[in-house]
Amino acid sequence: MNIRLYDTATREVRDLDPVNPGEVSIYLCGATVQSAPHVGHLRPAVAFDVLRRWLTRQGLKVTFIRNVTDIDDKILAKAAAAGVEWWAHAARYERVFTRAYDALGVLPPTYEPRATGHVPEMIALMRDLIDAGHAYATTEGNVWFDVRSWPAYGELTRQKLEDLGIEDDGVLPSEAGAVAAQKRDPHDFALWKAPRPGEPATASWDTPWGRGRPGWHLECSAMARRYLGTEFDIHGGGLDLRFPHHENEQAQSRAAGDAFARSWMHVAWVTQQGTKMSKSLGNGLLVSELLEHAPAPVVRYALVSVQYRSMLEWAPDTLDEARTTWDRLTGFVSRAGETVGDVPADEIAKADVPEDFAAAMDDDLNTPAALAVVHEHLRAGNSALASGDDDAARAELVAVRAMLDVLGLDPADPQWTAPTGDRHAAALDALVTVELEARVAARAAKDWATADAIRDRLTAAGIEVQDSADGARWALAGS
Ligand SMILES: [Zn+2]
């Protein structure tokens, strides 16, 4: 294995040196499911998807965990404002995120744990920390990490305690005084939070230190330990998670005795006019809106075309440029396919990628350089087609598709060629139309029993039929 990745902790490009040879374990901090994702939320997911595909293609067994934060202050506040249960609010947006990941061709993680399903693991971790003298509970039911007890605190982001500001940790101004009085040091952070007055009883769990709910940082440490063990290969997320989230995760896991992540990868932001995309600035581009204006692989191409550590400036013509390039790639793949015949998916999956492409991917996932190699082979493939050299055209087709497959962008992948929703809808429409035609024929023959039986069958299948002057229309019940 030759892959070298930039480790945010040591600030150098290092060889990937897995804990278990032949296997790679990865934990990516996933979504806090409080609202719909914008394209900036999807960038880390796509970047790690490319990493995973590249490692997998080299025969490594990848265990990839991406969590769901399904309880936190914002979820509780938004659910209360909307008048719905917090868990229903979280479930709704978890599905929206899943649809966005699926739409952009992000493979499902090996496992996708939810914070609320891992309270016992969090209690065990807090127990370890309290026993080791690195955490303390206060009578209010909060549990705090004692930063002064852990001299290495700040090592991930190379900050000294004295230089750090004080994170508000979701504390309301009205609570600030009481919270400050509980902490041994203003930088101590919450492992566990006592419920606020008025919060639903379903949003807290029993612990030996009182009822409460998880602090955000604790949940990732507990879930990483649960699914990847006490030491794993790569931990990552968006750049803004480095501090305090990842600093706190590393401090609490190592203070509890876990070796924790061997290396850290952080994905830069999507920016607009140089500013981080965020909903609070009003510049968030919802994934659902983007997909109304551009095919999903075009959005993915735009995200993949910039190396993950560089800021990705989302300009008005970003999607237009990606679309032009995508059309060129799909055009070649379909013309070459018509000329030399279909290439089995199996052959694409096993094909060796060109050395220059592999070198670019091994160089800290240098996707722009990798795409430059794709375009060299695209030109060679088009020349081969123009000169009628079918053998060369086929070789370039396999090379181009194999390289694009690593990036999740093979134009012939069923992910992009066969939108399942459309296919299923078309098949259903054809079947219902057959039934409705049979019903029309039965009525014409005054065979009322058969006509009624057809209608009953459709109703039982969840299909509503409405008769009108133009004939019968159908829709799924409740849609
Ligand atoms: Zn996390």
Image (tube, helix red, strand yellow):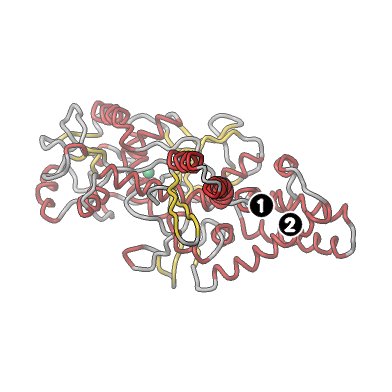
Mark 1 — residue?
410
* Residue 152 at x, y percent in the picture: 34, 41
Tell me if 2 is positioned left or right of 30 in this view.
Answer: right
Numbered circle sitting on residue 340: none
- Residue position marked by numbered label 2 in the rendering: 333
Check disc 2 and report its element: helix, strand or loop: helix
Closer-to-camera residue (53/288): 288
Q: Inspect this view and state whether residue 362 appears.
A: no
Identified by mark 1, the residue type is: Asp
Residue 73 can be seen in this image: yes
Could you tell me residue 54's position as x and y percent? 62, 44
Q: Position of residue 197 (x, y in %)?
A: 11, 44
Mark 1 CB in 8 Å range of ligand 1?
A: no
| In the image, farthest residue toward the front | 446
Callout 2–callout 1 Cβ contact below 8 Å? yes
**Residue at 72% across, 58% down:** 373
On the picture, is 323 further left or further right than 85?
A: right
* Measured Cα–Cα span from mark 2 to mark 1: 9 Å
Question: Which of the marked residues, 2 or 1, is nearer the chain's N terminus?
Answer: 2
5, 107: nearer the viewer: 107
Amino acid at circle 2 = Val
Residue 344 figure quarter = top right
Mark 2 nearby-residue class (10 Å; few <14, some 14–19, many ≥20): many
Is residue 409 left or right of 344 when viewed as pictured? left
